[in-house]
Amino acid sequence: MLAALLGAGSAVAAQEGGEIAHDNYGYYGLEPEIVTNYVSPRKRLGYVRVSVELMLKDADTVELVEHHAPLIRATIVEILGQQPEEKIKSLSGREEIRRDCFETVNNLLAKEVGQPLVANLLFTRYLYD
C-alpha cells in the first residue's frame, strides 16, 4: 500500500512540475494489414505484409489519429515500397524501416495537428516473400 501511495505521489509531482506523466498511453491498430510490393533485383515481385500498431502518447488522441489513418497508411506503404529486398529480409533492416516509419509518421502528424502524437510504432506481424 505504501508503494502505491508513493507511486501516485510521484505521478502527481511530475504533473505539478510541468512534466508529462506517461500513464495514459493508448493504442491504435491500422486495419487491415498493410500488403505492398518491395524493390527486388530479380525478375519477380516481392511482397511484404505488415500489421502496424501505433502506441499513442495520450489515449485521448485516438480519434485524431483515426481521422488521419489513411494518410498514415499511405506513408507506411510508400516507405515499405521503396525498400530493397536485403533490407526487408534482414532483422536490422526491419528495425531501420520501423524507425523510419515511426519518425515519418510523427513528423507528418506534427505538420497536420501541431504535435507528434505517437510514442512508438510497432510491427506486430511482419511477413515477406
Image (cartoon, rainbow, N blue to C red):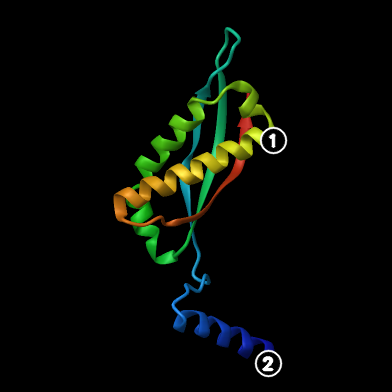
Compared to residue 77, the image places residue 63 above or below, namely below
Marks 2/1: CA distance? Answer: 43 Å
Residue 25, position as x, y percentages in the image: 50, 65
Depth check, front residue: 43 or 117: 117
Q: Looking at the picture, which amino acid does disc 2 mark?
A: Leu
Q: Quadrant of the C terminus?
A: top right
Left or right of 57 in this view: 124: right
Q: Position of residue 40 (x, y in %)?
A: 58, 16
The local secondary structure at tag 2 comes to helix
- Where residue 50 sits in the image (x, y, percent)? 55, 37
Q: Residue at x 52, y 44 (%)?
A: 52
Label 1 SS = helix
Q: Which residue is mark 1?
A: 91
Tell me: residue 92, above or below residue 108. Answer: above
| Residue type at tag 1 | Leu
Q: Among all residues in the image, which is located at the extreme front?
A: 17
Q: Which of the two labelled residues, at mark 2 and mark 1, occupies the earlier sequence position? A: 2
Q: Position of residue 9 (x, y in %)?
A: 56, 88
Residue in the image at 44% along x and 42% along y? 104
Q: Are marks 2 and 1 in contact (CB under 8 Å)?
A: no
Which residue carries the number 2 mark? 2
Q: Is residue 1 visible?
A: no
Residue under the image location 68 percent in, 87 percent down = 3
Q: Is residue 127 left or right of residue 102?
A: right
Q: Badge 2 local density, few (<14 within 10 Å), some, or many (20+)?
A: few
10 Å crowding of disc 1: few (<14), some (14-19), many (20+): few
